[in-house]
Each structure stands twice: as C-alpha cells, then as structure tokens.
Amino acid sequence: MSTLKKLADLSSAVASYWTDHNVTLHKVFASRAESVEYFHWRCDQYPGYLDLMPVAGFDGQDILDYGCGPGHDLVGFLEYSKPRRVVGVDVSRSSLAEATHRLKLHGGERVELLLARPDQTALPFEDASFDYIHSSGVLHHVPDLRASLRELRRLLRPGGRMRVMVYNHDSLWMHLYVAHTLRLRNKTIPADLPIRQAFTRSTDGPDCPIANCYTGAEFAAEAAAAGLACRTVGAAVSLHELHQLQQFRLEACMDLALEREHREFLLALTFDHRGTPLWNGLPAGVDLVLELQPA
C-alpha cells in the first residue's frame, strides 16, 4: 500500500472516529445558561486552562477555531469577546451539526462552520485571513502535523498569532496514569507496550486512531519546520491527574516494575504555593500550550 493511500485511509479513520466521539459526548443544550455553565465546568476540569487558552480579549479580530468540534470554545469567544469574524473548522459532520444548534443559543448564527476534508490539509481561505487561530486538543490527532502547521501559518496575518493545546509528554498523565495506573496497577494496557503507544490508548478511547504527545522541544521542532516560531506558554494539570497524584504517586514509586524514567519524573516533582505539581518549573499537566507566530 502506498504512503498516500495509507495517509488517506488514516485520515478517513480520524474523521469517522470523531463523528462518533466529541468533547461534549453529544450533549444537547436546552438554554444559553446551561451551555455557559457547561463551558465553565469543562474548563474547570483543567485549572488554568482559560489563562493559557483565552477566549476573551479578541474584540474586532478575525478568529479561526481549528478543530472546533461541537463548538465548545466557540461559545467562549461569543460570550467573552466581540470578534469581527468567527470561523470553526472540523472534520466531523455530527459535531458541526451540534455546534450549529448550540451556537444559536448564544446568538452565533453568523459563525461560519466548515466541514473540512479529512484527506486534505488545505482550507478554502485566502492567505493571511485571520488575526488569531485557536486550536485546543486537535493537532495531536492530525495525520500530518507539519502539513497542518504549514497551512495554519499560511492563514495567519503578519503579526497574527496562534495558540494550540497538545498532549504533553512531560506530564502526570504519561508518567503516572499511563505508566503505572493503566499498565501496572489496572493492567488495562499491556505493560510491554512502548509507552507512547500506551499513551495513545489512554486519552480519547482505546480505539482513537491518532493521539500523539509532545515535549515542548519536539513540538517546537515541528513548528520550525513549518515556518513558525514557537514558545511554550504553560501547561494545565487536569483534576484527574491531581487525583492520580494524591492516590498513587508513592505507590508507583515503590513499584519495582515501574521504569526508572517514570519513577525519577515522579520523585523530581516540586510544588508551587497552590500545590500545583511542577516538573522543570512547568506544571506537569497533560495540556501543553504553545504560542506560534510566523518566523
């Protein structure tokens, strides 16, 4: 099978998977108040997320939400900014239908929603169309990260910027939840599976076709190859990770079967004044946020 055929098949699998799954679990909202409350509840599952991936302060700007899913963050932009133009792009037809319904509750009938072709990275917008691109929890699922980043760079205006959230390799999710809880304690993932392959089964369901994770340096290298300057903004530690930390950190470190890299990560954690676990000075959370600009 050719590389192009494999990529096309993988792209189709990604689109099919995210037609069946999305971040709101296909929840239907009955009112604006219910939708807003859910927006804040979900953000609160990742303390600090809104500081890292803001939805306020974009008045008068043209915004692209790349991988908007069922419109969760689009709700935030409509509620807390007054953008000139808002566009949401996704490969999931069902999610876009749900976004259409939800956004009507927020006066968002004029939001442009585009169904992207899963086998193509090119989007039907002119060069330099957007002031700001937001992509939360999407780029770690794409079949060709570098090609996707090149396309997003094309769409950014001079002086524009993009913030992305991708899964963080240097996280409690990787070094505690996957390495210990799932592989050694619960035995729901084979212990001999390479750790990054094990990670792909842990975040969005065991059958998710693509779920990569990155260190800040790894993502910056991909960004540079796509013509983008990259800086790490921070990371958000999920409540799930904090729960794992309280329950299983010491147990994991005492387990002889836990590989040294994971034990050393867990033992090297420090904590800030709020009790947030840090690794090398950065919160040790699964949500790694980076800011990109044309180089």
Image (cartoon, rainbow, N blue to C red):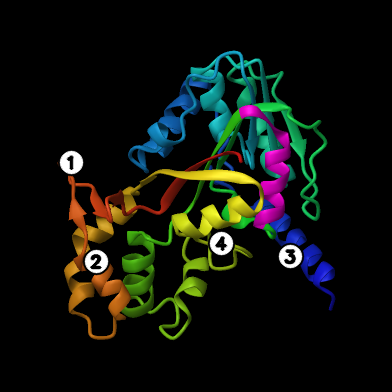
What residue type is disc 2 on?
Answer: Leu
Q: Which mark is residue 10?
A: 3
Q: Residue at x 71, y 18 (%)?
A: 110
The secondary structure type at the circle numbered 3 is: helix
Q: CA distance from mark 2 to mark 1?
A: 18 Å
Residue 120 percent location from the top left of the image: 80, 51
Q: Which residue is mark 4?
A: 211
Q: Residue at x 42, y 27 (%)?
A: 37
What residue type is disc 4 on?
Answer: Ala
Q: CA distance from mark 3 to mark 1?
A: 42 Å
> Where 81 sits versus 72, above or below?
above
What residue type is disc 3 on?
Answer: Leu
Prevalent SS, magenta region: helix
Residue 86 percent location from the top left of the image: 66, 24
Q: Which residue is mark 1?
A: 274
Q: Quadrant of the C terminus?
A: top right
* Residue 30 in view (yes/no): no
Crowd band around label 1 with a 10 angstrom C-alpha radius: few (<14), some (14–19), many (20+): few
* Mark with earlier residue (3, 4): 3
* Residue 108 in view (yes/no): yes
Q: Residue at x 19, y 73 (%)?
A: 251
The secondary structure type at the circle numbered 4 is: loop
Q: Which residues are magenta?
A: 145-159
Q: Nearer the viewer, residue 238 or 169?
A: 169
Q: CA distance from mark 4 to mark 2?
A: 23 Å
- Residue 153 covered by magenta stretch: yes
The secondary structure type at the circle numbered 2 is: helix
